[in-house]
Image (cartoon, rainbow, N blue to C red):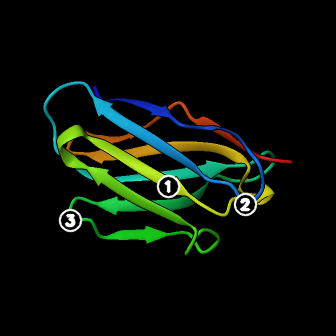
């Protein structure tokens, strides 16, 4: 069983930055894709960014040029650097990992962008 622990959310002013982290644990397994999704109140969960084991990344249109996803395979950790945050980025951010055992989701971390 894969466990995901997220950290780094919080309150930030418009134009500010945050860095999210998500670490996978629970045994020896191969991780294929790691990613971040977000869900704002009253909205569907949407893609933020994903990164494959070969470091190929994909971004949602609303975050391109502002967010950067990266991963440390030795630590089974994925990061999301979020810059130029605006109130529309306010949401619960969820980490997702696709491994040889299937898909796993983190518990979510709240990001609030407000002055």
Q: Where is residue 99 in the image (x, y as percent from the top left)?
A: 25, 45
Q: Is residue 35 above or below residue 23?
A: below
- Quick one: label 3, few (<14), some, or many (20+) residues within 10 Å? few
Kindly give the residue lying farthest to the right in the view shown: 115
Q: Where is residue 18 in the image (x, y as percent from the top left)?
A: 58, 48
Image-quadrant location for residue 56: bottom left
Left or right: residue 15 versus residue 105 is: right
Q: Residue 111 bears which disc, if any?
A: none
Q: Is residue 97 above or below residue 48?
A: above
Asked which secondary structure carries label 2, the reply is loop
Question: In whole angstroms, how far apart are the C-alphas of marks 2 and 1?
Answer: 13 Å
Q: Which residue is drawn at 47% across and 53% down?
A: 80
Front residue (pair 87, 2) = 87
Kindly give the residue lying farthest to the left in the view shown: 28
Q: Name the residue under label 3.
A: 54
Q: Is residue 18 above or below residue 54?
A: above
Q: Name the residue under label 1.
A: 81
Question: In whole angstroms, how far apart are the C-alphas of marks 1 and 3?
Answer: 19 Å
- The reply to whether discs 1 and 3 touch (Cβ–Cβ < 8 Å) is no
- Quick one: label 2, few (<14), some, or many (20+) residues within 10 Å? some
- Quick one: label 1, few (<14), some, or many (20+) residues within 10 Å? some
Q: Name the residue under label 2.
A: 15
Mark nearer the viewer, 2 or 1: 2
Q: Which residue is drawn at 54% across and 37% down?
A: 8
Image-quadrant location for residue 57: bottom left
Front residue (pair 25, 102) = 25
Asked which secondary structure carries label 1, the reply is strand
Q: Which residue is drawn at 83% across and 47% down?
A: 114
């Amino acid at each position: 069983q894969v466990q995901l622990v997220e950290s780094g959310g919080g309150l930030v002013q418009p134009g500010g930055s945050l860095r999210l982290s998500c670490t996978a644990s629970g045994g020896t397994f191969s991780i294929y894709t790691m990613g971040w999704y977000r869900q704002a109140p009253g909205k569907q969960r949407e893609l933020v960014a994903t990164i494959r084991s070969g470091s190929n990344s994909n971004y949602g249109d609303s975050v391109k040029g502002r967010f950067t996803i990266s991963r440390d395979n030795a630590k089974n950790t994925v990061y999301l650097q979020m810059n130029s945050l605006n109130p529309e980025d306010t949401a619960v951010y969820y980490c997702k990992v696709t491994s040889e055992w299937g898909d796993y989701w983190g518990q979510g971390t709240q990001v609030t962008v407000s002055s």
